[in-house]
Amino acid sequence: MDLSERQLQILQAIITDYVENAEPVGSRSIAKKYDLGVSPATIRNEMSDLEEMGYLTHPHTSAGRVPSDKAYRLYVNELMKKKNLSAKDKRMINDRLSASRDEFDRTIRHAAELLSEITHLASFAMTPATNEETISFIRLLPVDERTLILMIVGDSGNVTNTTLRLNVPYTQEALELLSKNMTVSYKGRTLDDVLKGEIIHDVGSDIEALSTLKGSVMPSFLRTLEDMLNVNLYMEGMTNIFNLPEYTSIDRARDFMELFARKDWFTQKMLARGEGVVVTIGEENDTMKDCTLITATYHVDGKLVGKIGVIGPTRMKYDEITSIMEYLTNNLSESFRLPGSTGDGNAGDKKQKKLDK
Amino acid sequence: MDLSERQLQILQAIITDYVENAEPVGSRSIAKKYDLGVSPATIRNEMSDLEEMGYLTHPHTSAGRVPSDKAYRLYVNELMKKKNLSAKDKRMINDRLSASRDEFDRTIRHAAELLSEITHLASFAMTPATNEETISFIRLLPVDERTLILMIVGDSGNVTNTTLRLNVPYTQEALELLSKNMTVSYKGRTLDDVLKGEIIHDVGSDIEALSTLKGSVMPSFLRTLEDMLNVNLYMEGMTNIFNLPEYTSIDRARDFMELFARKDWFTQKMLARGEGVVVTIGEENDTMKDCTLITATYHVDGKLVGKIGVIGPTRMKYDEITSIMEYLTNNLSESFRLPGSTGDGNAGDKKQKKLDK
DNA sequence: ATTAGCACTCTCGCTTGATGAGTGCTAACA
DNA sequence: TGTTAGCACTCATCAAGCGAGAGTGCTAAT
């Protein structure tokens, strides 16, 4: 059954008021503050109907009404209007987000900081997932007679290295040969592919030194690939939630903080979420049943995909926050675009918006 | 004025009891639990004296006594006996601390996790400070015609790199020349030294391409050096404190959590602390006046120095915790020793102990 | 269909009084 | 002179009781 125009207005008013004040809102205050042209009694009747339909709840008999998850969902999907960022927020983002294609980590952490400062919520940001990253080249560099550096370069300019200490000395020749060998074998293949695929044994078994060296290097090589696949998660503004009335109970605050102690679990959760701006409200989350989680994706060269997000109570300014996140991710994608490339695929200012679960 | 033997016994008993139960301890319960051979009345008199001397305080008239910072200081300096780790804790450390010289970050994070699991407090661990690290060599590697990788290798095997994107193409020649040039100029000098010192302009001004390239590379070089100097700080078990009775007030919990939101400030504080096991209690800390902070240092090749630490309320098991930290840092130092080197200088099992402020 | 009126419910803040733990003092004791 | 028993006193804590205020839900009038 659809809601009448007036019911929508009332629901909207209740949500607005509750988001603002965090207190159950009564019929009288709605009638006073929002000019709906009807008396408190009428509003009461409508509220009662809305409650029956599951859009409102009642903490106790003589308290006002509180929007349910269902109400927020309706609000996000239908009622909410896109908000223009305040000049201050825009300036803040433009000035402080000194994104640089060469410094993912720093930039991403900055983005998380910004996000939590602007929204006053807990926020996080992940470096791009590198599943699709391909290997550009591999190099082995000598340090001393038993130490060498393994360096793996990806096509997005991602560089990772490890220092290896061998049990037996290596020869310069073997080193160079293995470098070339590995580069030829793996160039152009994705990290995932290499890691899951068979280790290639094609060359080098004929030369003794090479095969020994390879035996020592391969385990580190694989482990380093794994490292490259790992995304980094930066979390900021966790303590912001202490200022919210919903977290004045120590238990709820504790539960909240404990969510983030499990960083890798959290990372997995986040990776599983869809593209664009995604909002999940309360019960829609399997854990964190009284939180809302909003994530948004940014792009690197329209290929690699990373996420930023905020977490807070279900009571939050959905319109503002989704707008901020959209602006911020567009900004990030823009900065992370390869200078030469034209805005392709997903990156940039294409207005993607996918708000449902 | 020195304390009598009996006063020490009573103080010791009060501390033990309070550390255990977190509740003001009364004369009667002392007399019952600890067999001092005197009546509650006598204990009351002694307590009164101890309070006058500043070792005890009184939350209110009719409550028991609580040890003051001064009492804990006395305890740590004089009364406390070294504790043997439980077999379980030892096994835990030995098994799980898979330290590897090549993977500082991972190992250090592991150490922090372990520490918080064993102590049930908030803990942290820092990667070694690299002030004394010297540069082994510098290499510039071509990626494509405008992209290159700057790689700086330190003498402890520390490798850092950055990808650079230039405005103008470079030549292979210039690249190699600059690599050599920089290596020659900086090899053997400490990071600090290079960063603070004059930029060397001696060579290369004669060749146009080289000088241009150098102009583009130097800023990144310096920034990368800074990155190398930065220590990483890992914090674990922050939420443990929610289980402690002193942090059931949301305000105190908030204050505590906020300390750690300021990661770099905290890092600075920690770097300033001395070698070995250092305990600072309550007011001895300029911030965190109701916390105790215990840090301990580990060594890499007896040269680089890193820290681990725990933070909690002043009420904590000083004997156990300092012992655990000593064991853990010795273990770390052992793992981080260069295979060839004999246990030199500070590293290893030398029983350093410096508990005062 | 809307509204005014009114009884009813429930929370919140305040006070009150009982309880109990613990001290501090005094006087007796060894 | 140091130690102890006894006792009055203090203070936090808890539960109960009460009034005020906010808000609902129902009914009857418009």
Image (cartoon, coloured by chain):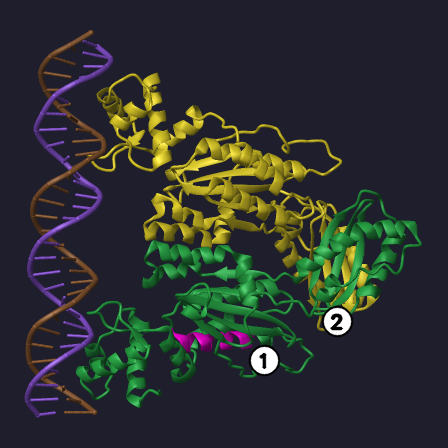
Chain colours: A green, B yellow, C brown, D purple
Q: Secondary structure at mark 2?
A: loop
Same subunit: marks 2 and 1: no
Residue B189 location in percent, x, y?
70, 46
Res B169 → quadrant? bottom right
Q: Chain of mark 1?
A: A
Reading the image, the residue beneath label 2 is B146
Q: Nearer the viewer, residue A121 or B17?
A: B17
Residue B111 location in percent, x, y?
57, 44
Q: Nearer the viewer, mark 2 or mark 1?
A: 1
Residue A266 location in percent, x, y?
52, 61
What is the magenta range?
A317-331
* Amino acid tagged 1: Gly
* Amino acid tagged 2: Arg
Residue A156 location in percent, x, y?
69, 69
Q: CA distance from mark 2 to mark 1?
A: 24 Å
Q: Secondary structure at mark 1?
A: loop
Residue A348, label in figure: 1
In this view of the protein, can residue B216 be seen by the observer?
no
